[in-house]
Each structure stands twice: as structure tokens, then as C-alpha cells.
Image: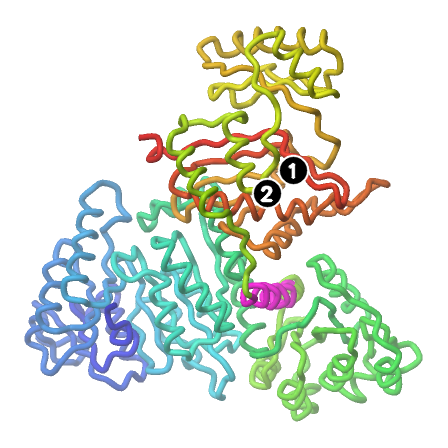
């Protein structure tokens, strides 16, 4: 692995292509770098200028006196490859390529050039960031090789003047967006360590840099802007490392919409994967998703100011001097899955001692202006936190008046330092800059957006739950080796599409449903099979060319007499043949009718980037309309499967509604675990599995897999 430390913490830097013209990027980058107090030498390299912005310039990297750790390239793309090779020969350990004109542009020329950049970086073992990068900023050493306006003549120092308790690092594939996080966060006195924009990622990618920063152990929270993930294995390893270390990754991933996918591809030459797969992978590793740059910054602020303090549950205490604002915040909390319980009598008695008759301690705690003047916001928050019925505190305030906070300066600092539960603050008026600075210095995250405040507290609870679940030793159900090998051999020999009669025996080997029913090829055989079943039956045409039986009229249900079964057989065969004249029909499957239950779909889809993904949804045949589905990487353990079920919007239906009994969620979770194990064991052979519908019966009565389909990968068909 190349030395990323030489990129972000070099002892000396050369700027190749530096210019005197500060109206252009070549001159602007050199100017920005020199405007910050980086202690090492910065050498301008220029073929045409003997001096750049008052500094002696050198004609080539070989002419620079002394060793160079980092070279910044801002030269036309056609010269980058030769210059990169010269840097390698000169012993430069890291290169930042600002230049654009590579894989982000149409045609093969740019992609080929970018591939050669990668090969050269590997040949010389150089840490190469870019091309098409907007550079980076490292605040500890004040090195800012970038043309971002956020770092050009800034109105604030790179770090707050006080010693912050934690730091945030940004790693973004988009340069402009990456520095927007810094610009917004720094105005809220958020302390940053690194802001790195990776551009096209010819060599180093986002999670290479995150891994390095985790090893540094000087970043507590990460903000990530993702257009794609080039190495799924690398992502898994690094995301797991961050989760185990308790270092939250807060990310946004573009490509959710078709327009977003086009933007990703055109901007960095990325192939944006299926968003649902990305979302599932991020959720699995506890990566928190933000919607916009303001929200990501606000989420990071909540974590960095509450280092080591995460809510142990979802119960929130709210204290305020405004009853209306407190009630509004309570609504916002409940809307995001938090609870606002009434405080216990003992805590209420402590608070009531300071309240006027028109205040209330029930929760939200409305101290009114009188109590705020008497004890202050900080003390009211401390008293609220004493209740064993709350897991976190939100202080609702007006940070417009600097004087009121100056009076309780010491209390605020003490509360922020000693409080054992997380605390966030929302100002319903726009905060005065001095008041905002005081909150930040004391160690409070101050929000100007109620939604972001409530959502941050909810995400802090989510993160704790995910991390605790992840750190437990998983219980993964496995098939015994002979059964696994038998299924693997059957899949290898099977046709490209396995309809239900072929799929059922393989699934049953993993405890998924029963290998029941009879495959028949005549009216008489259908009638005999139904009579042997001894109850109502279903008839299903079996053909790898007819995947949607309902649409083809190839399904008949609840048939009770031999005559009805015989007539249905003739009708189904005629309708199936009319629907698909060239279909290869194996016959008709005669099965006993399953008892009623809640319709669920279970499936597997092989994502090109991340491999098999388990899908779970409610709705049966209506799943494509309702789109209430969730995804997770395989395999799953039972606890993860139950959590996945809980993520469905319609999950309360399984708890029983309008007199219906609760469904057998444990059996559904068990089926999900077994299917995930099946998919993991045979990942290279399976493109899709569709169990639809799965009927979830009342608690204790299990599930019925009503239909099944397996589609093999193209590679497995050869």
C-alpha cells in the first residue's frame, strides 16, 4: 500500500505547473497554499517562469533541492503521464492530480489515459489522489493544496481557537461538495482534521483514505460523499473497522434516481450501482445516510460533541423556555421514531422547585422565561437528564441573546463536561455568532434546523443499536456439507431457469418449505394427484418460459373436486400455450392449498458490485406497486433478519391489525436466514431467487412458500 501519510502530511511539497496568474487555477492553488501557515517548503515548478509569486521556480521536479514528499500536478492532461513518471523517478512518494480530462469525459481516450495513471502509480508505489480532484486540506499541518473558495482568504482559522474534543474528516469524490461540508461546518465551529477530494480515483479511493485515517486514530467522525464504490471488498473491510472502532461514517450516495445515476457516470466516469444495494450495504455496516450537506454536517456535529455519549434507548427529555417550541420539537422527535415520555415523579419534584405555577415539568419541561432567568438553560438540561426515563436531552432555546448565556457560562461548560447522556440544542431564533461560538466551545452541538436536531438524536440511537448488534457473535445457520454439495451439483446440472418443481427440492434441503406436490402431464394424473392429496389443491403450470403464472392464466386455486381439477388442468394448459406458444412446458404441479396468511415476498438478487442481496417485502403480487421492500447482504443471522423485517414500512401489519392475530415473525426471520445462507453458499451460480408469495401464518404456525423460482448466473449457464 502506498504511503498516504506522505500525501496528507508531507514534509515538503512541489507544485508542478505553478503560475503567477492568480486568476487561473495554476496560480490560485499556489496562492492558497502560501496563505496558510504550512511549515514545510513549497517549491513552484514551472518551465516558463524563473520566479512564481516571489518564490524561486524550478524547471523540473529533478531540479528541486532536497527531497519532495508530495507533488501537486496542475498541468494539461496530455502531459500528466510523463510528469508522473518523472516524479516516480525522482523519489516523490505522493502525487495530487488536480488536472481534469480523464475518464470523466466521453470516449476511450480519457479512460485509457486514466488507466495508465493507475499503472504508473502502482509501478512507483506512489500515493496518487485524483485526477480531476479539487485537492485537500489538512488542518493539523495547515496544508491546503486546493483552489476551493472555502480555503481562499478564509475569514476563520482552519481550526477553532480552543482545543476541540474531537475532529471530523471529509472524504468526497466531488471536490466542490467536499469543501462545501468544510465551509458549512467551519461556520458552526466544527473542528476538521482532513478534507480530501478524490476525483476520478485512478489510484486512491475513498475507503483507502478512510482506512488510513482510522489507523491515524485522530479522526472521530467521517463525512463521505460517494458517487460509487470501486472495491466492494475494501468497503466491507474498512466500514467494519470503523464500526468496530465506534467511528461513525456519515454518508450520502448519489444515484438514487435515473438523473442521479447519469450525473455520477458523467462526473467521474463512475458506474453507479443499484441504489438499493448500496443502501443495504451502508445500513449493514452502520453507515448513516444524510440527505444534504447541511444535514450531514449537523449529524457529524452531534456525534463529535457527544463523543462516548450515545443514547441507550430512544426516550428523549426536552427542556425549554418556550412551551410552543418545546411541543414542536416533541412532534419532530416522535416523527423520527423517538419517544418523549413523562418524567418520573422524583425528577419532576426537583424541577418543580424552580418553576412558576404556569410552568410544567412533565416533558417537554417548560421552564418559562422565569425559570430560565433563575437557573439557566444548562441547569434545566442537567435536571432533565437525571430522569431514568430519558436516554438523551434536547435543549430548546433562543441563542439570539448573548448576555443570557454569558451569565451561565460556567454552568454550560460544566454541564457539557459532566453530563452522562447525550445533549443537543436547537435555537428557534437565529443564533448570535458569539452565542454560537460559546455553545461550540463549551461542547454543545447547536442546531438551527429542528428536523436535523431530532434526526441526529435518532441516528445516534440507531448507530448504537447497529453497533451493538454487529459486535455480538452472529448465529448463522448453515447447511450440512453433504446437502450443500448436493445442491451445488444440482444447480450446476440444472437449466438456466429453475421453475418451482425444480427449485423446491433444492430449497427444502436448506429447510425452506417442503418438497411437496406432484408434477403431472395429463388430466387424469392431475385428478388422481388431487384425490390423493385429500383436500383443496392448487394447479400451477411449470415452465421456465412462463415466470408470471397469473398473467398467463397458468394458475388455478382452491379446487375441491376431481372434475374441477380436470377442467382446470385443460384450461391452464390451453391458456399457457396461447400465452407462450413456444414455451417448454414441463407439466402442471398439483399441490395442497396453503392456509391463509400475510403475503410476503422473499428473494435474492445478485448485485454486480456487492454480490447476492436478500430482498424482503410485503405485498405478494402487489410488491411492484407498493415497493415496500428492504435489502441486506447475505448471509444474515436471526437478529439481523428480525431487524430487517422491522425496517418495512408495513411491518406493523405483521403484529396483527383489526382483530387479526400476530404473524409468526420468528418463522419469517428463520426463512430469511435460511435463504440468505442458500444464496451465500451458491453465490456464483445464482442470479435471482423469487419466493413469492410467502404466507406468514399466525404466531407459532410457521410460513408457507407458495411459489419459487431460481435463475442462474450467465457464468453458471456455460
Q: Is residue 657 left or right of residue 555?
A: right
The scheme the figure's colours follow is rainbow
Q: Residue 551: which quarter of the image?
A: top right
Residue identified by numbered label 1: 600
Residue 693 lies, in percent from the top left, at: 63, 32
Q: Say which of 65 and 502 sits in front.
A: 502
The magenta-colored residue range is: 455-472
Occupied quadrant, residue 457: bottom right
Most foreground residue, 84 or 587? 587
Give x and y (percent) for residue 284. Answer: 52, 57
Please provide percent x and percent y for residue 43. Answer: 16, 78
Q: Which residue position is annotated with label 2? A: 616
Q: Which numbered dot is residue 482?
A: none
Q: Quadrant of the N terminus?
A: bottom left
Q: Is residue 663 visible?
A: yes
> 10 Å neighbourhood of mark 1: few (<14), some, or many (≥20)?
many
Q: Could you say which is closer to the camera, residue 40 or residue 122?
A: 122
- Residue 260 seen by the camera: no
Q: Residue furthest bottom?
A: 410
Element class at badge 2: strand
Amino acid at each position: 500500500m502506498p504511503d498516504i501519510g506522505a500525501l496528507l502530511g508531507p514534509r515538503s511539497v512541489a507544485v508542478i505547473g505553478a503560475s503567477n496568474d492568480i486568476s487561473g487555477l495554476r496560480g490560485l492553488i499556489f496562492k492558497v497554499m502560501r496563505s496558510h501557515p504550512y511549515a514545510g517548503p513549497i517549491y513552484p515548478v514551472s518551465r516558463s517562469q524563473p520566479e512564481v509569486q516571489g518564490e524561486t521556480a524550478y524547471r523540473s521536479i529533478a531540479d528541486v533541492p532536497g527531497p519532495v514528499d508530495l507533488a501537486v500536478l496542475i498541468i494539461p492532461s496530455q502531459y500528466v503521464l510523463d510528469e508522473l513518471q518523472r516524479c516516480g523517478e525522482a523519489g516523490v512518494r505522493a502525487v495530487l492530480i488536480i488536472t481534469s480530462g480523464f475518464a470523466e469525459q466521453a470516449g476511450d481516450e480519457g479512460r485509457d489515459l486514466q488507466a495508465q495513471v493507475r499503472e504508473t502509480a502502482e509501478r512507483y508505489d506512489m500515493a496518487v489522489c485524483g485526477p480531476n480532484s479539487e485537492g485537500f486540506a489538512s488542518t493539523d499541518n495547515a496544508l491546503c493544496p486546493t483552489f476551493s473558495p472555502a480555503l481562499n482568504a478564509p475569514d476563520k482559522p482552519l481550526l477553532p481557537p480552543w482545543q476541540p474534543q474531537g475532529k471530523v474528516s471529509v472524504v468526497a469524490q466531488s471536490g466542490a461538495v467536499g469543501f462545501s461540508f468544510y465551509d458549512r461546518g467551519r461556520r458552526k465551529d466544527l473542528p476538521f482534521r482532513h478534507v480530501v477530494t478524490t476525483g476520478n480515483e485512478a489510484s486512491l479511493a475513498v475507503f483507502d483514505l478512510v482506512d488510513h485515517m482510522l489507523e491515524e486514530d485522530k479522526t472521530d467522525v467521517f463525512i463521505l460523499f460517494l458517487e460509487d464504490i470501486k472495491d466492494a471488498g475494501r468497503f466491507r473491510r474498512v466500514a467494519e473497522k470503523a464500526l468496530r472502532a465506534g467511528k461513525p461514517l456519515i454518508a450520502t450516495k448519489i444515484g438514487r434516481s435515473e438523473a442521479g445515476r447519469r450525473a455520477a457516470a458523467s462526473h467521474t466516469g463512475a458506474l453507479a450501482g443499484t441504489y438499493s444495494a448500496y443502501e443495504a450495504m451502508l445500513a449493514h455496516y452502520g453507515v448513516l445516510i444524510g440527505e444534504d450537506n447541511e444535514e450531514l454536517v449537523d449529524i457529524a456535529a452531534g456525534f463529535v460533541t457527544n463523543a462516548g455519549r450515545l443514547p441507550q434507548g430512544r426516550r428523549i427529555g426536552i427542556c425549554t423556555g418556550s412551551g410552543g417550541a418545546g411541543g414542536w420539537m416533541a412532534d419532530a422527535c416522535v416523527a423520527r421514531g423517538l419517544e418523549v415520555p413523562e418524567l418520573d415523579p422524583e425528577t419532576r419534584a426537583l424541577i418543580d422547585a424552580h418553576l412558576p405555577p404556569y410552568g410544567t415539568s412533565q416533558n417537554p419541561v417548560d421552564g418559562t422565561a422565569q425559570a430560565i432567568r433563575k437557573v439557566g438553560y444548562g441547569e434545566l438540561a442537567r435536571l432533565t437528564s437525571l430522569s431514568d426515563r430519558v436516554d438523551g436531552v434536547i435543549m430548546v432555546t433562543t441563542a439570539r441573546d448573548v448576555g443570557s448565556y454569558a451569565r451561565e457560562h460556567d454552568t454550560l461548560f460544566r454541564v457539557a463536561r459532566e453530563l452522562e447522556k447525550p445533549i443537543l440544542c436547537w435555537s428557534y431564533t437565529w443564533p448570535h455568532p458569539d452565542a454560537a461560538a460559546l455553545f461550540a466551545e463549551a461542547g454543545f452541538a447547536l442546531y438551527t434546523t429542528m428536523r436535523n436536531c431530532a434526526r441526529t438524536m435518532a441516528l445516534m440511537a440507531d448507530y448504537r443499536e447497529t453497533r451493538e448488534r454487529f459486535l455480538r457473535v452472529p448465529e448463522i445457520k448453515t447447511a450440512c456439507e453433504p446437502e450443500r454439495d448436493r445442491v451445488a451439483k444440482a444447480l450446476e446440472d440444472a437449466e438456466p431457469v429453475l421453475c418451482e418443481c425444480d427449485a423446491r427440492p433444492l430449497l427444502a434441503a436448506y429447510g425452506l418449505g417442503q418438497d411437496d406436490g406432484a408434477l403431472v402431464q395429463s388430466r387424469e394424473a392431475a385428478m388422481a394427484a388431487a384425490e390423493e392429496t385429500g383436500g383443496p389443491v392448487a394447479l400451477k403450470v411449470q415452465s421456465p418460459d412462463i415466470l408470471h403464472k397469473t398473467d398467463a392464466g397458468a394458475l388455478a386455486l382452491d379446487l375441491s373436486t376431481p372434475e374441477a381439477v380436470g377442467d382446470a388442468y385443460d384450461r391452464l394448459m390451453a391458456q399457457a400455450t396461447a400465452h407462450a406458444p413456444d414455451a417448454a412446458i414441463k407439466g402442471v404441479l398439483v399441490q395442497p392449498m396453503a392456509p391463509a396468511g400475510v403475503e410476503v415476498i422473499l428473494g435474492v438478487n445478485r448485485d454486480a458490485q456487492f454480490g447476492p442481496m436478500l430482498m424482503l417485502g410485503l405485498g405478494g403480487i402487489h410488491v411492484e406497486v407498493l415497493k415496500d421492500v428492504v435489502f441486506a447482504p447475505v448471509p444474515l443471522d436471526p437478529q439481523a433478519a428480525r431487524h430487517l423485517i422491522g425496517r418495512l414500512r408495513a411491518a406493523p401489519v405483521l403484529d396483527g391489525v383489526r382483530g387479526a392475530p400476530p404473524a409468526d415473525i420468528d418463522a419469517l426471520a428463520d426463512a430469511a436466514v435460511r435463504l440468505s445462507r442458500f444464496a451465500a453458499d451458491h453465490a456464483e451460480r445464482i442470479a435471482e431467487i423469487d419466493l413469492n408469495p410467502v404466507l406468514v401464518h399466525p404466531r407459532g404456525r410457521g410460513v408457507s412458500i407458495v411459489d419459487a423460482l431460481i435463475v442462474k448466473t450467465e457464468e453458471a449457464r456455460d
